Every structure is written in structure tokens, then in C-alpha cells.
Image (cartoon, grey):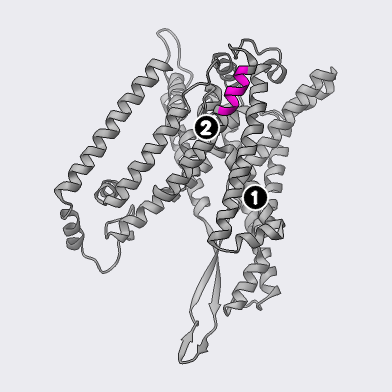
Amino acid sequence: MISAFFNCFKIPELRDKIFFTLFLLFIARVGANIPLPGLDPTPLQEFFEAQSRSGGGSLLGLYNMFTGGALLRGAIFALGIMPYISASIVFQLLTAVVPSLARLQQEGEVGRQKLSQYTRYATLIICLVQSVLLILTLQNPAKLFGPEFTGQIILVPQIWFTITSVIFLTSGTMLLMWIGEQITSRGIGNGISILITVGIIADLPAAFALTYQLFTAPVGQTAQLGLGEGILMLLFLFLVIAGVVMMTQAVRKIPVQYAKRVVGRKVFGGQSSYLPLKINYSGVMPIIFASAIMMFFTTILSQLGAVVNANWLRDSGFLFQQGQPSYYIFFGVLIFAFSYFWVSVMFKPVQIADDLKKYGGYVPGVRPGEPTARYLDFTMTRLTLAGASFLTLIAILPDGVLFSTGVPYQAAQFFGGTGLLIIVGVLLDFLRQIETYLLQRHYDGFLKKGRIKGRSQGRTRQLVDTVGLEEGKKLWRWLIVMFASGLIAWGLNAYLF
């Protein structure tokens, strides 16, 4: 497996794609650390650090995770790539219910380009709205976060700050959208997903440092966690990651048999195949929707209770906070509801059954047409039950680790939840694309059984040895440039931030 990573740099095309992706990710991380002119994010950071120590996140904290910490830094990339994600989800749902958009999607590459253009326009509108709302929040933070929030965030005249910040925030998101599209077309992996993943992983060193403090204590004091507890936490983390990988890759294979057809002198069909139905068909979307609704509902109840001076409204808001049994009950119900809603919108059993019938395929033991559609719908319903149960378990695991071990929330979130599901899914897709390049060039993949049959190790070794001197020089030039860029970035970060 380790040799596969070194072989990635022996293929010129793959090497250029990897370095191109790393260069654009470097630009994205630099923009996530450049603050808006006239803004001091220190009070906001201190407030949310105190909240995370008390246990739990917030809607703004969830959004900050997707921006890679840029939101709490008040950076020009504070909106992140989420406006584009929101626009994409909206159009993805609209194509399932609006006939004109559905026809546009079926027109091939031209129709998809038009949908992409509409998505970009929608992203621009969402950026303008969200940037204005964010600036209004920063101008009056106590109205949203409560009277316990103290400190001044904006240090310049509000009119000038509003105009410049709307321009910077909107331009930052549009630049991130362009970076994501460039990574997808000229780099490795899905660019938008990789940007979100890198933003989540950016909090990993800080989470590790906070956790390490629990195992060390000053002289004369006792550490909060011992060596045995640390080993158990690592084993539990590996088990959770293994379970997420297994459920992400798990599919139910529906056997499909194709009938023989004679066209002229040629015989088509007659082979067997299968239709893969993913157990976790909805992915991470139900957890994102459920978390956003729960946190938004809690904030609305608390603020409304403070405005109308109604204690029962504030108490109702406390019932939906993390740590309360009612929170997890409603959270699980929302995950199940969104899982079935997503499957009902995106999974089309009638269309799949019609396509199978059109090409002479059928499920053994099931009649083609409507019976096949009912069978697929029944099977997907049962699979969604298992997938929603898995998502619910993964969603509440960080809270279990948080309240049972005392690990900070910034570290506990890596034991499950939205972040872990996104990281695992994106990395699996990233490694799958790299392995495709390796196998096409007759290298070993990340697994030994991925070797292409019929090629000897001598042939593979011969191809490795044919890497010329010029390619080696080009590799060293890339490594020197990346090392120098890293030193410059580290120096700027230490000096400016």
C-alpha cells in the first residue's frame, strides 16, 4: 500500500494532477486565514471556545466546521463553499419535481451545462443574502448570542464595512466555487467535496492538542485521562472508522438477467448482471438537515422567549439542547424522516423498471414493469431503515464520547457525525480515482489483488525503470516549489495570524 503512494509520483499525468490539486487547496487555506478589513474576530472565537468547553455546538459552529474555521476567523472565505452546496441541493431537488428542469437534465452535456450555469447564478444570489445577514449579525452579536456575549467585533464605520465585506465575502465564495470546478476538471477527485473535507481536517491538529492536554498535567496534579483510557479511545476510533467505511461501501446486489435478442446476424443479451442499491443511499444529507433544524429551532425558541419574556419558551428551547433525552429522540426522528424523504425524491423505481424492460432485463422471479418497480421500492424501503439507523448511531456518537470521557467537543466530533462521514466518503472516492490511474499504468493499486491480470512483475518493474532523467528533475522541481510554498505559508501565518 505504501509503494502505491510512491508510484503516484512516477506517472507524469497523475503527479501533475496531484500537485495541481494541492496548489489550489493551498490557496483555499490561505484565504481562510485572511481576515476581513476592519474586523476583530477575537471576541467571537473566545465565546465559541467557551461554548465548546461547556459541551455542544451551535448552528454557527456547524457552519464554521464546513468553512474550515474561516467563519470564526472572520476571513474573506467565511461563507465557504456552502452557498454553492445549497444551490446545488435546491436544483437537485427541483429537477425531481419540475418537468422542465428534468427534461433539461436529460438533454445530455448541453442540458447539464445550463443547469450548472443556473446553479452559479443561484450561488451568487445566496452569497449576497448570506453575506448581508452575516454582517448584520456581526454588527449586533448580543441580539443573537445573548447578553453573555461581550466585546466589539467591528472596528470601522459600519457602512464602509458592510459594502467592502459583501464584496469580499461574495468574491471569496465564487473563487472557492471556481477552485472546486478546476480541481474536478484538472485535478483529482470532486473539488467541492475535497474543499469541505480539507476544511474539516484543518481542525484535527487543534483537536489532537486539546485531547493531549487531558493526558498531561502539571506537577502536583493528576491527569484527567490515563493511558488505558487513551488506548481504548484509539481502538474505538478505529472501530468507528471501519464501521463507517463498511456502511459507506455496502450495497444490496439485485440480480438482473438480460434476455437474448437477435438483431440481424448478431445475438445480444443473455448475460447476468446486478443492480447495486446502496444501504446508505442518502449519504450525509439527513444528518446535515436534522442538525440544522434542531439548532435553528433551539435558537429561535430561546431568542423568542427572551423577547416576549416567556420562561416556558426558554425552557422549551432547553429541551432541545444536546444532553437532553428529548433532543436525541427528535434528532433521530428527523434523521429517519429526511432519509426516507431523500430516497423518495432521488430514487426512481418506476424509471429503473422501465429502463430494464426496455433493454430486455428482468429480476429473476419478478415480472417486468410495475411488479419490478414495487419490488425495488420495497427493497429500498428496508435498506433505508438500516441506513437511517446507522446514521442515527453515528450522529449521536460524538455526544456519547463528549459526555462520557470529557473530551472537548472539537475532538469528539471526529468520533462520528457529519464530519467523519464526509471525510470517509471523499477520501474513498479520492483513493479510488488514484487507483484507477495506477492500474491503467500496470502498477499495483492500494490492494495487491488490484493488480491487472496477465502482466508480470517484471513488466511492471520495467515500466518503473523507464522513468527518465527529465521526469525525475521535474519531480524534484515540484517538490522544491511545494516545500518553499509551505515555508512561506508558515511564515506568513506566524507573522500575520
- Who is closer to the viewer here, 63 or 222? 63
The dot on residue 429 is none
Q: Which comes before the other along the chain, label 1 or label 2? A: 1
- Residue 56 picture quarter: top right
The reply to whether residue 377 is in sight is yes
Circles 1, 2 touching at the beta carbon (< 8 Å) = no
CA neighbours of label 1 inside 10 A, class few (<14), some (14 to 19), many (20+): some
Name the element at disc 1. helix
Image check: 87 left or right of 475?
right
- Please give the residue where the numbered disc 2 appears in the rendered image: 172
Q: Position of residue 355 (x, y in %)?
A: 61, 72
Distance between the alpha carbons at the discs numbered 1 and 2: 22 Å
Q: Position of residue 188 (x, y in %)?
A: 40, 48
Q: Which residues are magenta?
A: 160-167
The reply to whether residue 229 is in sight is no
Is residue 161 shown in magenta? yes
- Please give the residue where the numbered disc 1 appears in the rendered image: 91
Can you say which quadrant of the picture contains the C terminus?
Answer: top left
| Residue in the image at 76% along x and 22% along y | 303
Majority SS type along the magenta span: helix
Q: Position of residue 178 (x, y in %)?
A: 49, 41
